[in-house]
Image: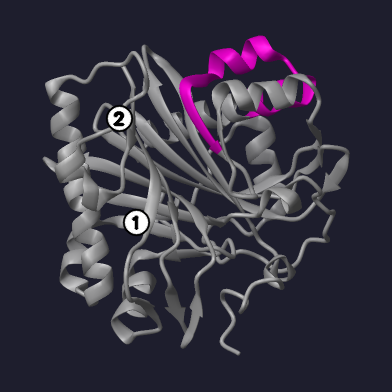
Amino acid sequence: MPRQIFLLPLLMIAVAGFARAQGTTKSQADTTIEKEVLEIEEERDQAMIKGDIATLDRIFADDYFWVSVNGTIHAKAERLTDLRSGVVKYESFKQDNYRLHIYPDTAVMLGRAISPVQYYERVNRNPRQFTNVYIKEDGKWRLVVHQSTPIVEQSEASAPTSVAPVGSATTRGSSDEAARKEQYNNGSKNPLALSGEGTAASEADAAVEKEILKVEHEKDQAMQNRDMVVLDRIYADDLTFVNARGQVLTKAQRMEEIRYGNVKYLSFDKSDYHFHIYGGTVVLAARENSVVEYHGKVISSPRQFITVYVKLDGRWKYVAHQATPIAEHYFESLPFRPGSKE
């Protein structure tokens, strides 16, 4: 069964311990997993500050990928090269509002980062909401994905605007748009998984991909039709949903905004599917151009998202989701545009 734990800032944990949801208990196994994951997270943070590439190479899974604040995808080799060369520098780590969700051999960590990041000699101090997914492989926890989304202030978030799509995410996968749409609509597999580097997926992986796409399609149709029964079945009880404004929603909050029409999906358009399959856990990355009406405002800007599915009691459950806008002018209010060298 999944477990949800609310965490204090990492450096305080050793002294103050963990904060947990009211009424929940923590097993010895949970305690061990928390300790292991948090130790790896702290080790990663220190390695990022020091530029310790050997340590990061050990912590990052071979198929690790990073979704940046501008929605671009970077593979492990590219991420390590940027850190090694000094293109990206972390002087310190300031993170809070941690949540840790534990599943079989999987840990999903959410938090808010306010660490200053130097990127091409310019510093970004804007807050970001992040999701880290750790998978236990051969007895060791490995980080398989990190995604960051800029946190929009509440006043700005309450008045979203419609923006035209610009650019394309840096992704690897099928470039045939018609094939990608057919893949989504028919639940067929993507022949180029991100972890596969162009190799055909195994029959077992292909079957899993087909199952996940079927659930994705069912979920999307349920959101469009406001079918709360279907959504309640697909959404995990401890679902965490990070929208494109960096707001974290629980299952109840997500279902409420759909039920009462605060969020309406006018059309669905998804492409560039990439699957990372780890036994009973699947990380799905994709680009979305779906048209959404949010509190009366139409949003059509492209987003890059990750969705985490975990198989619980024989069913694939939607346990985590995070979206990041792919639009340069979304960042015009920031001191610099992430991804720009100018």
Query: Magenta region, mostly helix, strand or loop?
Result: helix
What residue do we see at 51% from left, 57% from top? Answer: 128
* Residue 62 drawn above or below residue 50: above
Say left or right for 258 vs 10. right
Residue 339 appears at what percent x and percent y?
56, 76
Residue 102 is labelled as 2
Q: In this view, does 15 lie to the left or right of 310?
A: left
Q: Is residue 293 magenta?
A: no
Residue 101 x %, y %: 35, 31
Q: Nearer the viewer, residue 183 or 293?
A: 293
Coordinates of residue 85 in the picture (x, y in percent): 33, 86
Q: Regarding mark 1 in the picture, which secondary structure is present there?
A: strand
Residue in the picture at 43% in, 79% down:
118
Q: Earlier in the sequence, mark 2 or mark 1?
A: 1
* Quadrant housing the N terminus: top left
Along the line of sight, the residue nearer the viewer: 311 or 259: 259
Q: Residue at coordinates 54% horizontally, 66% vertically from top-left? A: 126
Instruction: Say few, some or many: other residues with alpha carbon within 10 Å of mark 2 (under 14 / 14 to 19 / 20 or more).
Output: some
Q: In this view, does 251 lie to the left or right of 245?
A: left
| Relative image position of residue 279 (x, y in whole percent) | 30, 32
Say if the magenta span includes residue 220. Answer: yes
Q: What element carries label 2?
A: strand
Q: Mark 1 points at which residue?
A: 64
Task: Give the quadrant of residue 56.
Answer: bottom left
Q: Magenta residues?
A: 217-241
Q: Distance between the residues labelled 2 and 1?
A: 19 Å
Label 1 environment density (alpha carbons within 10 Å; few <14, some 14–19, many ≥20): many
Visible in this render: residue 260? Answer: yes
Residue type highlighted by circle 2:
Ile
**Direction from residue 181 to residue 30 in the image, left or right:** left
Residue at 69% of width from left, 40% of height from top?
182
